[in-house]
Amino acid sequence: MSTPIERLVVLMLENRSFDHLLGFLKRDNAAINGLTGTETNPPADDSRPQVQVSDLAGDVGDLDPDPGHDFNDVTIQIFGSLDTAQPADMSGFVGDYARISNNPIHGENIMRCFKPQTLPVLSTLAQQYGVCDRWFSSVPGSTIPNRMFVHGASSAGSVTQDAIVAPFLLHTIFESFGPNTIHTYKIYTSGSSILLANKYLVQHQAKFADYSQFESDALNGNLPAYTFIEPRYDDDDAGNFANSQHPDFPVDRGEGLIADVYNILTKSPRWKSTLLLILYDEHGGIYDHVVPPSVQCSPENAHLPVPSSGPPFNFDFSRLGVRVPAVFVSPCIPAGTVINDRDYEHSSVVATVRKLFCPDTAPLTWREAQAATFENVLSLEGSDIRNDVVNLPPPVVSPGVVDISAAEEHRSPTDLSALIARAMHYSLQQRGIASPVDPSTLTTASQVAAYLRQANQLSLNPPGAQP
């Protein structure tokens, strides 16, 4: 019998594949389905040899411009072309990135992966606790639909980043924490979140907190049953830097966030009954060698919805996206644990949260109803529960690489922060609140950061609201 999970903390970072971050852990643990170092992709230039995977990934510089991770890009990466009738062989990564970067040689950077020594925080936690090498993104596409799946086991029919209405309408697991449940939840943000645009959650603003409050809540034993942590998605005009690990932001800043969350939780009086799941929303167009599985709705779940995407893709959500890193951290998990007993995807978070904390409520979708759950991952109990705290090494910045994250007054916003701003604008409109400005007119990261602060304040304190 495993130790029950009384508190689940999920930290979801950005746009990295399993092989890219953790594939070379296989050198130290053969049980991990990682990299042998012999994996290849066809070159974009036929005069060049097959492109072999390497352990030469750096902190920044490899992945500028941002690799393609829209629906068509991911299809090409998995199948080698847009023809999904042919066998999936994960052969299209180099060609797709060469097209995006307009440089056949630069396209080969997509095969660069980290070795444990250059990604020490995440690698140490994966080695000292549990790593899952069968966790797939939910949609073979971009960030927003995948982040919606981790909250609602659906993307409301969207497979693109252009999701403005879908986040507002999405039914989420948070709605299952109703007045009849004894458990609750909290969402810690660093200034922005697509969840702040959700119709239900904007009516429950007290469930949001700034990440700066996380430490005091944890140390005082006040974390709820379910905690979701958002990274900072962009540099802002107040000197704060992105720590989401989205290419090509420095991965060491995300490593710092991971270490901070871990070190805080280990000091919590509730640590021994807490599970930390470190997860990535999608692969970001970066190489992975494992073919994503298909999923089919079983007859008994046919009454549960997962809206199809409609034209132009007409996607029925019967294929998962590319594999992403997933690391389970708890004193009830032995060092060296490899979790690969079944296929997991982001709907597994929704299904597990419901099973643990809202067991008397119904699944939202057939993807949730069929998703593998991880409630039994805490395998140690009683006197076997670990008392050690792992001393994490400091994050590594690649030598000689210029830090591109320094705030620049005129730097363009990331696509995600701009889209979150548009989603907030739509949400305010639907509630009859005048937006301070049309976010489509904003051109710099600092302007978008300022807009998001204003929009969040309006959402929290709409004009005419009773004090």
Image (tube, rainbow, N blue to C red):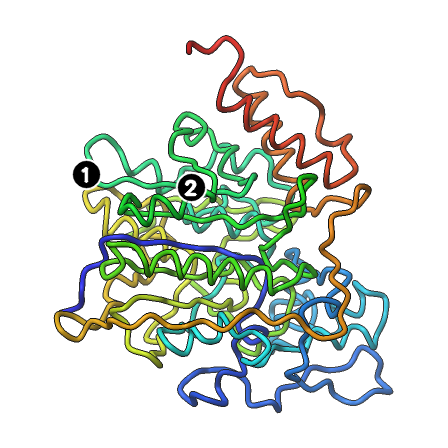
Badge 1, how many Cα within 10 Å: few under 14, some, many 20+? few
x and y percentages locating residue 75 in the rendered image: 64, 64
**Which numbered dot is residue 182?**
1
Badge 1 amino acid: Ile
Q: Looking at the image, can residue 299 be seen?
A: no
Residue at horizontal 61 percent and vertical 38 percent from the top: 420
Badge 2 amino acid: Gln
Of residues 96 and 239, the one nearer the viewer is: 239
**Vertically, is 434 above or below 53?**
above
Residue 405 lies in quadrant: bottom right
Q: Secondary structure at mark 1?
A: loop
Of residues 5 and 268, the one nearer the viewer is: 268
Q: Looking at the image, can residue 342 be seen?
A: yes
For the residues labelled 2 and 1, say whether their Cβ atoms are less than 8 Å apart: no
Residue picked out by circle 2: 213
Residue at horizontal 36 percent and vertical 78 percent from the top: 338
Quarter in which the N terminus is drawn: bottom left
Q: Secondary structure at mark 2?
A: helix
x and y percentages locating residue 81 in the rendered image: 70, 69
Residue at horizontal 54 percent and vertical 67 percent from the top: 322
x and y percentages locating residue 52 in the rendered image: 69, 87
**Vertically, is 171 above or below 393?**
above
Residue 267 lies in quadrant: bottom left
